[in-house]
Image (cartoon, rainbow, N blue to C red):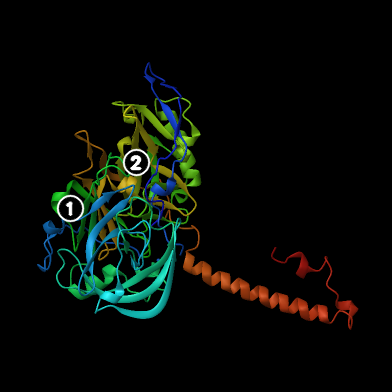
Amino acid sequence: MAYHKGSIPFGALFIMLCFGMAKSHYTIPLKIFIGTFNSSLDLDLTPMKRIQASGNGLSLASDPAGIVNFLDMVNNLQGDSGRGYYMEMTLGTPGQKLNILVDTGSSNFAVAAAAHPFITHFFNTALSSTYQSTGRGVVVKYTQGNWEGELGTDRVLIPSIPGTPTINIATILSSNAFFLPGVNWQGILGLAYPLLAQPDSSVEPFFNSVVRQTGIPDVFSLQMCGAGLSASTTADPAGGSLVMGGVEPTLYSGSMWYTPIKEEWYYQVEVLKLEVGDQNLNLDCKEYNQDKAIVDSGTTLLRLPVNVFSAVVEAISKTSLIQDFTSGFWGGTKLACWLKGETPWRFFPKLSIYLRATNTSQSFKISILPQLYIQPITDVDGRLNCFRFGISSSANGLVIGATVMEGFYVIFDRAEKRVGFAVSRCAVNGGLAVSEILGPFSSADVASDCAAGGLLKEPLLWVISYALMAVCAVVLLILLLLLSCRHRDRSREITDESSLVRHRIK
């Protein structure tokens, strides 16, 4: 999860009234909301820390083994992009019910095991006769927030999944900026691959254990139904569906399009280009995949590498009908407010992301309308509707978070190493669809591998770091030995002109 999540406590807010002029004949009653805009609303739980896909379509309408009924899993999620999407699960013997945040950007199943001021209850391990501690500690850090605790195992009852598989559970004993005001979940369900598991990949993730112990197919799919709805703490939760074992056809319309999973750590995909309206940003495709490009339900916003973000903001500014829009809105420090009954969406363009198809010579594009990235947050005195920008810059790669995912039914087909997208039936606002998929398009005009040449992956970076530390230690030892010989052999004195000093790592 790339973590920028939680709630927005709007305390003493001050409103600076500004009026934006449209390039057309419209006069837009635009106001900028300044003050304690708490970006903790933006859930961004990407941990600080990993084959090529193939195959033609998976179209499971039900589990062929008859183990699960997908219709029973429809509407099993609550929440929204601002507070995260969560499902109720039962842990231990006798069972203790907790709401668990669904996160495709991490791999630990972790639950609160101690009291915290922002949660109503926690998993009491002492009351479960089947809980077993492994005695291993675990610490997980996210882009925002962290927690630490102890690893153990226990039985978990998952709605509509037969049996009670035994799952690795991290019990959270202390945390910082992880549980936030206004959230209604007490744990996190990491659905990514073992390479992201903490403290190491020997900790089998939740879904791996479920597939191994129950025999369901190694596929899950996710529908998040908060499109165009307010992310404020007072709004009713939207909901959605997490289907384990396959695909439920009633949750989407049109065709399903698949993109290969580039590497199995996060759900890493390959972005070929971005368009704002009909304008291609014309960046090198490697810019979009710098470090990585991932699909992460635990991240609220669409997060873009710095250069890409700047290009998108510039293109939206030129394409929209609003002149001289404040930089604070684009940067996430200010809200834009319109008079009650006015909505800003008609003034902004759609945004399209091109993904490489499983036929690697082709691509398809997923498009979101402004209802998904110009997001309602709150109203003021019943007179103003206020909105935030649902896109942010990122130093850790491109993240397709809830801003985009709320427009689509997303299939994580681990068996075929691919991620699928189809238009979600709940991606509707005011009776109009707010997302679309088009393709195929030729990918002949982009590099054969846009993810090549990116930054080294974190596990490898750790190896290189330790290797460099060892080299530095050897160099220091040599320097000390040479210095100790200084008075015995002046001819061997190290000077600023020596190649060793001149080319040392600074």
User: Pointer 1: what residue?
Assistant: 75
Quarter of the C terminus within the rendering: bottom right
Q: Quadrant of residue 376?
A: top left
Which residue is painted at 36% across and 75% down in the image? 151
- Tell me if residue 459 comes above or below residue 100 in the rendering: below
Badge count: 2
Residue at the bottom extreme, as displayed = 488
Q: 358 and 478: which one is in front?
A: 478
Which amino acid is tagged 1? Answer: Asn
* x then y, percent, for residue 368: 31, 40
- Which element type, helix, strand or loop, lies under badge 1? loop
Q: Residues within 10 Å of mark 1 (few under 14, many from 20)?
A: some
Q: 177 and 332: which one is in front?
A: 177
Q: Quadrant of residue 449?
A: bottom left
- Quick check: 240 left or right of 502? left
- Tell me if residue 207 comes above or below residue 422 in the rendering: below
- Tell me if residue 421 comes above or below residue 105 in the rendering: above
- Which-is-in-front pick, marks 2 and 1? 1
Which amino acid is tagged 2? Answer: Ser
* x then y, percent, for residue 130: 24, 79
Q: Which mark is residue 352?
A: 2
Which residue is painted at 31% across and 44% down in the image? 365
Q: Is residue 87 visible?
A: yes
- Which element type, helix, strand or loop, lies under badge 2? strand
* x then y, percent, for residue 105: 36, 59
Q: Is residue 277 visible?
A: no
Lower sequence index among marks 2 and 1: 1
Q: Residues within 10 Å of mark 2 (few under 14, many from 20)?
A: many
